[in-house]
Amino acid sequence: MAFDLSRQDTICAPATARGRAAIAVVRWSGRAAFAVRDGIFRRRRSGAAPAALAVRGDVVGDDGAVIDDALCTSFPGPHSVTGEDVVELSVHGGTLIQELVLERLVTLGCRVAEPGEFTLRAVLNGVIDLAAGEAVEAVVGARTTQALAAAQRALRGGLSQSLAPGRERLVDALAELEARLDFPDEPLGDANRTALVTSLTQAGAGLRALVAQARRGRRLQDGARVVLWGAPNAGKSTLLNALVGHERALVHHEPGTTRDAIEAWLDVDGVPVVVVDVAGVRDASADASIHAVEAHGIERARAEVSRADVVVLVQPPGGVAPPPLPDGVTDTARVLRVASKCDLVPVDTLMADAAAHAFDVVLSAHSGVGLDRLLVRLAEDLGQDGEAPLVHTARQEQALRDAANAIDDAVVAVADALPDELACSELRRAARAIDTLLGGDVGEDVLNAIFSRFCIGK
Ligand SMILES: Nc1nc2c(ncn2[C@@H]2O[C@H](COP(=O)(O)OP(=O)(O)O)[C@@H](O)[C@H]2O)c(=O)[nH]1
Ligand SMILES: [Mg+2]
């Protein structure tokens, strides 16, 4: 799919979800927006309407027949969501009316918008920067209060605001160095060199601080992944069900019941969490009774645990210890050791077990004991301290890293008094990387990758 970057067309789309509802909104944006409005909408009362006013009237079809009665709001550009003339028509909810309105708009010359095309136009018309455009989808998709807070902060231009001081340092340094290139007889003095190194080092540190938020930011978007890991029958699926409060996963006393990875969403203190229940891992080669499907499930379990943020090791009383984790998991994931089915054992055995195995949480999915403790531990491990993170996509993280690396190289060049051209070219590279974050300089492929994930009409 290729976007119409020239923005010649007037685009239209439903702005509310299809289906039965009180109201459905259809909107369109572009040069011909107001002319199209005058073709589809007839005011009830005559007289000039002030701009940006909502007026009551009839939606009329090709043959002049009334399709619905509606509220029509006009937003003259450039002070509209897209920066262009925009019209929103609120009609009665219901798929048919929405479709008839869209058909009529197309007859009048509109094109049905691609996913994210309204937001793309807002970016191309300079209403919001690219990072804020990316945040639009994050606002729509936010599952928890913390995810929403972070997305709203980014939507309000938080990233460009935090980048501004660093970018200014960069531009100042570039100006200073470029001036020296023009006047080679007046080289940079030691004091100036030191000041430049200090200033650029601070700019680099600011960028790295943003990079450090990226993992938290992505978790808020995509959900932190908590994988339940243990031998078959340890009580993993029962634990998943107890955590989410309904029978999400099948539970049975036969080992090997869970085969596919089963996901369920949980709100842990405002952090969205995907709890993943997987097949209990046992050695397929050693046990001929293991079905090929279960063996696939075990492979899937290994893949899931390898990308976990937290692994919950589940061990029943007197039962088999959780199988060893694949290499590298403990480098990236936190591990919580959980003793399950504590309702089955007397308290003194339990205490001895807990001491022997250094369990973090002792719980029973049947009685509910210890579940709140597990949630507290998860909240601690996934805790979102400090400000809501502004960086939440891999693209943004990469651009920030590129900029920080280029600044580091420039610092070395300045500190070691290497030719100033070197530092200048690194600083220009850093500035370009920052510009790609905010949208100054990105290709169509990048825009495509970002906006095609949006929903239609956004
Ligand atoms: N008494 C008791 N039994 C449990 C508890 N959790 C699971 N079980 C039982 O243990 C068996 C295996 O449970 P399941 O959740 O399927 O284990 P999984 O293979 O690790 O997913 C089932 O018969 C469950 O009813 C618990 O907290 N208390
Ligand atoms: Mg299971």
Image (cartoon, rainbow, N blue to C red):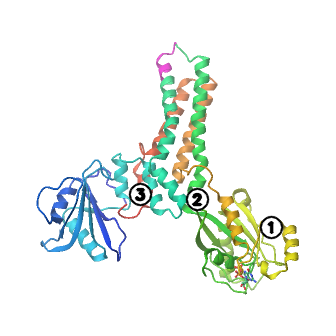
Q: Earlier in the sequence, mark 3 or mark 2?
A: 2
Q: Quadrant of residue 75?
A: bottom left
Residue 295 lies within the magenta run: no
Dominant secondary structure (helix, strand or loop) of the stretch shown in magenta: helix
Q: In which quarter of the image is ligand 1?
A: bottom right
Helix or strand or loop: what does disc 3 sit on?
A: helix
Instruction: Return the residue at label 2.
Output: 219
What numbered label is drawn on residue 451?
A: 3
Instruction: Return the residue at label 1.
Output: 359
Q: What residue type is labelled 1?
A: Phe
Q: How crowded is mark 1: few (under 14 residues within 10 Å), some or many (20 or more)?
A: some
| Rendered view: 254 above or below 335 | below
Helix or strand or loop: what does disc 2 sit on?
A: helix
Q: Which of 278 and 75 is in front in this view?
A: 75
Q: Position of residue 424 (x, y in %)?
A: 52, 29
Residue sitting at 30 percent across and 66 percent down? 25
Q: Which of 22 and 248 is in front in this view?
A: 22
- The label nearer to you, 3 versus 1, is 1
Marks 3/1 in contact by CB < 8 Å: the verdict is no
Residue extent of the magenta highlight: 178-185
Q: In which quarter of the image is residue 282?
A: bottom right
Marks 3/2 in contact by CB < 8 Å: the verdict is no
